[in-house]
Amino acid sequence: MKQKLTLLALLLTVGATTLSAQALPSVQEVYRIFQGKCTVTCHKGATPEGGLDLVGTGATELARAVNVAQKLVNVNPTNAHAKNTGLKRIYPGRADRSFLFKKINNTFEPTLAALHANEGSSMPAYPGIEFTPLEKELLRQWILYGAKTTGVLFDKALVESFYNNGGEKSFPDGPPPAPVAGTGFQVKMGPFYLPPSGEVEYYQKHELTLPADVEVTRLDIKISGSSHHFLAYNFTGTGANAIPHGLRLNANHSQINLVAAVQEALDLNLPSTTAFKWPKNLVLDLNSHYINYSTQRPYQCEAYMNVYTQTPGTAKQEMFATLLVKPDIPIPNNGNKITHTQAEFQFGATDRHIWGFMGHTHKYGTEYKVWKRLANGQKGDLLYDASCPFGMPACAAPWYDYKHIPMRYWEPLLPVNWSTGIIHEATWVNDGATSVNFGPTSDDEMMVLIAFYTLQPITVGTNDPIEDATSVRLTPNPAHGSVTVSRSGGDGISAFRLFNLSGQEVLSRFNMTNPMFDLDLSNLTPGIYFYQADGQSGKLVVEQ
């Protein structure tokens, strides 16, 4: 599996845009902001505030900028409280762990905690010289791209265009709420920016600061409809040591495991007796792929992962995740149906007990299926059909939507003898201008099966899509004209989708922060529909 993941990671690299060779190094741009706001009164001279001189020394402006960066990046703050909580003056790649950014934030980044009483006041302390939102963003971008002292790390003009002329946001209503204190925490990736019609896939090392080992029972992943996918890996051994801080294009995966993978906003709420097991020193590697579908406006890309935890030793079974990849998939542009098949077996004598399967292709994909593999190597029972609602085979009229490929869940879990294994198969019709193969952009193709499993059986609930078995409720049901969607527990719904009996999506809502909202059904034909909401599913009857 490691070999396959490494190959996948080496292929998944794509840039957002080519930066102008005439642009100033990013560290010099940030330095100029400091000179206009921080050195006017406080951070200069023989006794600068907090012992931090932001004027610097050197014969050129760039030399002075580098000198100042050396006083900031990975340097402990003089403030004892900030130092004791693990902050650096500038923590490369992490604005949320950079004390200087926290001092200038003042509600600009709403997910960032306010200054503690022992951390002093916001800076600059004098009216009339506050940082503008654009200046705060430029500083944040420098940090997110690794706070390097060389090179043009991001497109300043693109960020200026977004702030001065407007653009699209992944979360126009603000960030999704984090888990209630004591129940978990939130991981954020971004923001990064895309030009009109741009596309990029970034990776980012993310060190956790867990006080102790935890069990993770739920990963509620929030991404926008412009996201192609979001994945979270964890580094094993010393794999994280060789990976630079900050947003990067190169996956550079050599010692990693898959934690989770989604293609749209999805709430991975694990079966009640299972959990992912995370040690306190776990380092994640986040992977976000966004496409800007606007031809006129820049796009602000963000991804959030709400992590819900419980005390270690509570779960009876550990949940695992893996990617099963076929990297050699030549697909000629002849308009014919092209199919590639791969068997996965003999990964060990232990059975796998499958909680979920989800296929993944790009735009030329027309099918993705999984079968049990028989001892003679032939296909057995059809387990998964991505053309059907909830991935459940034998729907009346299969309908494949590569942007919204469903996950199929089994509760109780599906036992698979891994010495025999499974067969997965994808089909494409390439009517484009060129032949394609496996690659990272939306103009390339992929064949990836995401699987969640345990090593021992568990028994929870039922695999029938019955509305009463979920925490999401549709009332009234049967419904006429409209229906109210609600979720117990006070959490919003990341993704709600309604399908007809042919498997076609007829209604959808994404990133609903309110746990209750109404749907207008007046344009639907009376009949039976199926819904999927954050990994839960059920039936809705629409009456005349």
Image (tube, helix red, strand yellow):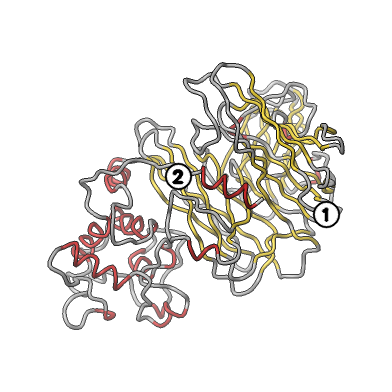
Say what secondary structure mark 1 lies in: loop
Residue type marked 1: Thr
Please provide percent x and percent y for residue 51: 26, 81
**In the image, what residue occupies the spot 45% across and 63% down?**
112
Residue 82 occupies quadrant: bottom left
| Mark 2 → mark 1, Cα distance in angstroms | 47 Å
- Circle 2 or circle 1, nearest the eye: 1
**Mark with earlier residue (2, 1):** 2
Mark identifier at residue 265: none
Q: Assess disc 1: are there few (<14), some (14-19) or many (≥20) residues with their C-alpha within 10 Å of its C-alpha.
A: few
Location of mark 1 (residue): 350
Q: Assess disc 2: are there few (<14), some (14-19) or many (≥20) residues with their C-alpha within 10 Å of its C-alpha.
A: few
State the quadrant of the C terminus.
top right
Residue type marked 2: Pro
Q: Is residue 58 left or right of residue 317?
A: left
Extreme left residue here? 59
Q: In this view, does 334 lie to the left or right of 391?
A: left
Location of mark 2 (residue): 172
